Image (spheres, helix red, strand yellow):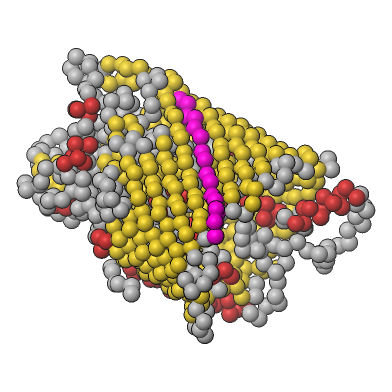
């Protein structure tokens, strides 16, 4: 059911290569002696050996007999191998506030994007980005005020970083159908994850090949021309385990000029070369072609939320977004065009290739080395300008994990270091009238280089059987180097005369991040957590050269943002049917990096707020209260304010102390009540009703204009059954109605800038409501159906 498309060539080539490699490796490994490999979940850890290993090496000094206490500690250490302990640092680091979203929570629904699954975790907030699967993901409000992409958290895919060295992540390449679990780690985490982890981290885990054990094909389709064909294949053969996921998704979009076509390939393969050495290969490729609407003002949203009747600027209906384009492509008179007329959109490719080698020195010590090449190639005519560039990056990390005893107590020690770098030159072009995002002359070019290197150390020690103490520290140096050349054309209709204004910056930032935590587990029902930790995030090079007007200029005084956070939490699980988790946190930010929209579409301005405070509460609950019935809830309360910030607008200053930080919703809740027939003729038939609530929030620093909140209701019915067949294993059918009551709501609202009158009086909300380049509407009522069938 895959339909051909010109952009599908790269994805098809990658898919064919991955399938060929999977088959070749599997066939080759069937001739090798069988060797135990890492357990697939929750961590790929090699089973502990029942007797010491023998090696053809020089004779060693006989080991001293172990004391009874040491023997007990050694036995406990074998139950959790150092490889598994290292994996847990990306999944559920001890002492950290963390939630794992298991596949069972989204396997029976049409999950198109991260928006459909991450809301099951408290602390998470989602907003629509510039593309079909491009979403802003925020942990504790960390990324809520950024204009595009994902900042202030670090993202991994099977432990491989997919956040580039400049701190930018994009979710275009994430198709939830590929994953078996998603780990959400919340709170300042730079001691463990380094630069940009002020909010925490996400780890997406694909399904191990052994759990797929065959081939699965699925298709989702529904309203607005949406169709997603996807395939998962996996196997564990001898010493090799591999899984491959591929998808082709396309749709017309529910807003004018928002059709899309995207292909994704995600491959993971692990080969146990020797009893002590494991090699893991990772490949992700995503091709995206999409048209892009223009973000609206609040008034435009109320007039025409879905940008209908916007074929041309001359005939545009009220509420249509427009851009002004130079008629000659570089200066002089302008024409007003809509997104459809100008042909705005994105044509991007993202390719990630990674390798990991793990070596066991013995049953207590594992050395891990990992390398990732990540190439982001963009062509983005998103407004009056178009960004073009290729952004290749390299990331190397190495660490040593040892499990054993320290002063007679169970201990896990990890030390490591890393180096990553990104160097490129990108060009911003003027978009000309005429359609198909015709390029005029260049507006600016930016050479940029970002390099991070550092070391980290972490110690987990069990003081007594019920108390574990955790201490960690990270040190990192970040070097930025940028040369921005802003071009001007002073003579009307004469492109030969060009002016250039060059701005340079080469700041170097050095940061240190300690953390301490205690975990108290008095019994099998309760766990109490206390943690104090720090985070840091440096600016991106591109932030250094954008003015509040959206034009190129000198913004090179930006500083590193840092935060100090306190967490206090409790987890209660009296039985398998009940899980409750509650966490209160308080974080103090210095020089917080805050972004707001500018008059230039797609361009944001970044500034430092000297001091701010983030505090809140996170609650999660699961309750299987009767046979087949299940209730889940994820709630987040956020109160985030400026405590030291004076803003200057056109020579007038305004005190923002006590104001809410814009873009941060104070209350978010996702709750679901479901039923699955556990037995009888209707076994496997089920359904659920889901309610999503997002509270309103301020859009500007003065807290004058507020984006309205919303409540959405979704309904789902599904059926899963095993198949008695020589070829088929199982069948999964589902139908979902989203936004049942057809509520018109805001899915994304970028921060807007305040403005003043000539007398220095701040313009009221009625004026700010006309500020464009901010809002995307959410989807109206939609019907989506799907099926999955598993083959043996």
- In the rendered image, the vertical position of residue 785 relative to residue 525, given as above or below: below
x, y percentage for residue 543?
Answer: 37, 35
Q: Nearer the viewer, residue 493 or 10?
A: 10
Q: Nearer the viewer, residue 316 or 652?
A: 316
Q: Is residue 338 magenta?
A: no
Q: Is residue 92 visible?
A: yes
- In the rendered image, the vertical position of residue 55 relative to residue 87, given as above or below: below
Side (left or right) of 189 relative to 505: right
Q: Is residue 509 visible?
A: no
Q: Is residue 614 magenta?
A: yes
Residue at the image position 90 percent from the left and 50 percent from the top: 68
x, y percentage for residue 706?
Answer: 29, 31
Residue at the image position 45 percent from the left and 33 percent from the top: 638
x, y percentage for residue 725?
Answer: 50, 84
The quarter of the displayed image where residue 219 is located: bottom left
Magenta stretch bounds? 612-627
């Amino acid at each position: 059911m895959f339909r051909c498309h010109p952009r599908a060539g790269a994805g098809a080539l990658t898919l064919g290569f991955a399938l060929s490699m999977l088959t070749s490796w599997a066939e080759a490994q069937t001739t090798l002696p069988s060797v135990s490999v890492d357990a697939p979940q929750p961590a790929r850890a090699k089973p502990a050996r029942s007797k010491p290993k023998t090696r053809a090496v020089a004779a060693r000094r006989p080991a001293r007999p172990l004391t009874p206490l040491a023997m007990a500690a050694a036995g406990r250490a074998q139950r959790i191998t150092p490889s598994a302990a290292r994996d847990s640092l990306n999944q559920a680091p001890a002492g950290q506030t963390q939630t794992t979203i298991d596949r069972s929570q989204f396997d029976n629904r049409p999950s198109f994007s991260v928006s459909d699954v991450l809301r099951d975790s408290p602390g998470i907030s989602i907003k629509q980005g510039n593309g079909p699967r491009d979403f802003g993901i925020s942990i504790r409000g960390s990324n809520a005020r950024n204009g595009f992409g994902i900042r202030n958290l670090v993202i991994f895919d099977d432990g491989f970083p997919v956040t580039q060295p400049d701190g930018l992540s994009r979710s275009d390449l994430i198709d939830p159908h590929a994953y078996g679990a998603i780990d959400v780690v919340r709170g300042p985490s730079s001691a463990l994850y380094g630069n940009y982890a002020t909010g925490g981290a996400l780890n997406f885990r694909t399904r191990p090949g052994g759990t797929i054990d065959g081939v699965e094909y699925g298709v989702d389709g529904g309203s607005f021309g949406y169709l997603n064909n996807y395939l998962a294949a996996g196997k564990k053969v001898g010493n090799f385990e591999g899984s491959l996921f591929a998808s082709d998704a396309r749709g017309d979009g529910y807003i004018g000029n928002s059709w899309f076509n995207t292909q994704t390939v995600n491959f993971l393969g692990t080969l146990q070369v020797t009893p002590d050495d494991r090699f893991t290969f990772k490949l992700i490729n995503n091709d995206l072609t999409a048209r892009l609407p223009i973000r609206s003002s609040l008034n435009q949203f109320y007039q025409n939320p879905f940008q209908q009747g916007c074929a041309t600027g001359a005939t545009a209906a009220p509420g249509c977004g427009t851009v002004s384009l130079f008629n000659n492509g570089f200066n002089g008179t302008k024409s007003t065009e809509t997104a459809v007329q100008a042909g705005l959109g994105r044509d991007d490719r993202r390719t990630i290739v990674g390798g990991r080698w793990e070596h066991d020195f013995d049953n207590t010590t594992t050395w891990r080395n990992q390398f990732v090449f990540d190439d982001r190639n963009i062509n983005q005519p998103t407004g009056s300008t178009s960004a073009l560039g290729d952004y290749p990056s390299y990331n190397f990390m190495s660490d040593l994990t040892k499990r054993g005893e320290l002063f007679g107590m169970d201990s896990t020690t990890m030390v490591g270091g890393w180096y990553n770098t990104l160097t490129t030159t990108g060009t911003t072009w003027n978009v000309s009238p005429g359609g198909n995002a015709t390029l005029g002359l260049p507006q600016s070019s930016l050479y940029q280089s970002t390099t991070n290197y550092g070391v980290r150390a972490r110690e987990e020690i069990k003081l007594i059987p019920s108390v574990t103490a955790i201490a960690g520290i990270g040190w990192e140096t970040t070097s930025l180097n940028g040369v921005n050349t802003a071009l001007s054309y002073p003579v009307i209709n004469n492109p030969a005369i060009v002016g250039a204004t060059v701005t340079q910056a080469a700041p170097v930032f050095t940061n240190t991040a300690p953390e301490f935590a205690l975990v108290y587990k008095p019994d099998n029902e309760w766990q109490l957590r206390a943690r104090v930790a720090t985070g840091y995030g440096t600016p991106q090079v591109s932030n250094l050269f954008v003015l509040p007007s959206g034009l190129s200029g000198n913004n090179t005084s930006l500083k590193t943002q840092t935060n100090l956070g306190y967490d206090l939490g409790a987890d209660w699980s009296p039985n398998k049917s009940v899980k409750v988790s509650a966490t209160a946190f308080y974080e103090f930010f210095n020089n917080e990096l805050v972004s707001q929209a500018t008059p230039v579409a797609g361009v944001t301005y970044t500034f430092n707020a000297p001091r701010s405070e983030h505090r809140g509460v996170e609650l999660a609950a699961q309750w299987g209260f009767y046979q087949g019935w299940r209730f889940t809830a994820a709630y987040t309360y956020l109160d985030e304010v400026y405590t030291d910030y004076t803003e200057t607008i056109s020579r007038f200053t305004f005190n923002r102390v006590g104001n809410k930080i814009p873009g941060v919703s104070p209350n978010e809740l996702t709750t679901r009540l479901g039923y699955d027939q556990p037995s009888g003729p209707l076994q496997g038939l089920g359904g659920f009703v889901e309610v999503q609530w997002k509270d309103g929030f301020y859009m500007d620093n003065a807290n004058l204009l507020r984006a309205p909140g919303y409540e959405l209701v979704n309904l789902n019915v599904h059926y899963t059954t095993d198949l008695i067949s020589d070829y088929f294993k199982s069948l999964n059918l589902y139908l979902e109605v989203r936004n049942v009551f057809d509520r018109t709501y805001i899915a994304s609202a970028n921060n807007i800038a305040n403005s003043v009158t000539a007398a220095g009086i701040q313009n009221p909300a009625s004026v700010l409501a006309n500020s464009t380049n901010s809002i995307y509407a959410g989807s109206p009522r939609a019907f989506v159906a799907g099926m999955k069938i598993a083959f043996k």
